[in-house]
Image (cartoon, rainbow, N blue to C red):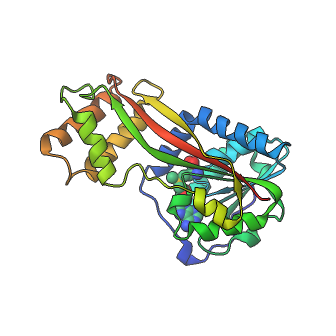
Amino acid sequence: MTPPDAMPHRHHHEHAAGFGEHLDREAELARELTGWALDLATTALGAPARSAIDLGAGTGAGTLALAHRFSDAQVHSLDLSPELLERLASAAEAAGVAGRVHRHLVDLDEDWTGVVPEHVDLAWTSLSLHHVADPERVLERTLAVLRPGGVLVITEMTSTLAFAPDDLGVGRPGLARRLTRALAASGYPPTADWTAPLAAAGFRAAPPEVRELTVRGDPSGKDYLAGQFAAWQERLADQLDAADLGALAAVEHDLRAGASPLTATSGRVVWVAARP
Ligand SMILES: C[S@@+](CC[C@H](N)C(=O)[O-])C[C@H]1O[C@@H](n2cnc3c(N)ncnc32)[C@H](O)[C@@H]1O
């Protein structure tokens, strides 16, 4: 594992405690979806990638999937969070791919093109592009570092979000609907449409493809969902009444106890675009 680039102080960026763990759990649950997006990338490239960049890499969900799929590839992981990049480093070490993973502590809103190689085969950005202040500029810079024929894969969430059963298993009829409505009003899920910006930046993009991710309150997804329900009680404190907030706490409790029938379904959209 190469050390991260030197970091000016203004880049320092802290995430809420537990965010890295949340990203790791999400990576595990989204493994199949990530595989599908990698299939799309592989088809678009026509040959295995030998260099890849992961923009807003977080704890390395994409980085590790890229390194596994393309066993000869050097993977460059860019993020502005030192804590998340540290976690990425440990994960790459544990996965035995540290020698091909290169961390770069950078703000994607600044000029990061100098830290990655020229003529990159594959650029990957998952649930990150909507975070940057100037995504159009990031797309232009991505086009500039890709080789002609190089491919960019962007993943975002769609507005689809649904919970079952309707009472979330705690006996409050209509709670599922009130929760999704309150979350939408608070800006969750974050959505973005990159079709026009991709074209404006000079990419040739296929129509976006959509998939659903279903997470269950069984051992596979209970900790992830419990974390979300914990966060949402705070986030929605001003939007739901006390009885509904209490019910969200009960859902969290049932999840942690392994006794919740909850299922959550959310949407993902993937753009695959090439540098002409
Ligand atoms: C929701 S996480 C997604 C992480 C990872 N791509 C994944 O799929 O698990 C968004 C990531 O974007 C990073 N990020 C947000 N704004 C950024 C910026 N301006 N420059 C670099 N990274 C940024 C955050 O630190 C975080 O790791």
Q: Nearer the viewer, residue 126 or 209?
A: 209
The mark total stands at: 0
Q: Nearer the viewer, residue 88 or 118?
A: 118
Percent of width and height locating residue 102: 74, 57
* Rendering quadrant holding ligand 1: bottom right
Q: Quadrant of the N terminus?
A: bottom right
At 61% across and 55% down in the image, what residue appears? Answer: 86
Q: Quadrant of the C terminus?
A: bottom right
Give the left or right position of residue 109, taking residue 203 as reference.
left
Task: Examine the rendering and report whether any part of residue 81 can be seen.
Answer: no
- Location of residue 273 with respect to 22 vertically, above or below: below
- Location of residue 22 with respect to 168 vertically, above or below: below
At 53% across and 34% down in the image, what residue appears? Answer: 29
At 41% across and 49% down in the image, what residue appears? Answer: 189
Percent of width and height locating residue 59: 58, 50
- Location of residue 210 with respect to 50 vertically, above or below: above
Percent of width and height locating residue 201: 67, 66
Q: Quadrant of residue 7?
A: bottom right
Task: Examine the rendering and report whether any part of residue 194 can be seen.
Answer: yes
Q: Nearer the viewer, residue 87 or 248?
A: 248
At 75% across and 39% down in the image, what residue appears? Answer: 68
- Location of residue 132 with respect to 51 vertically, above or below: below
Q: In which quarter of the image is residue 148?
A: bottom right
Give the left or right position of residue 171, taking residue 110 as reference.
left
Percent of width and height locating residue 178: 24, 40
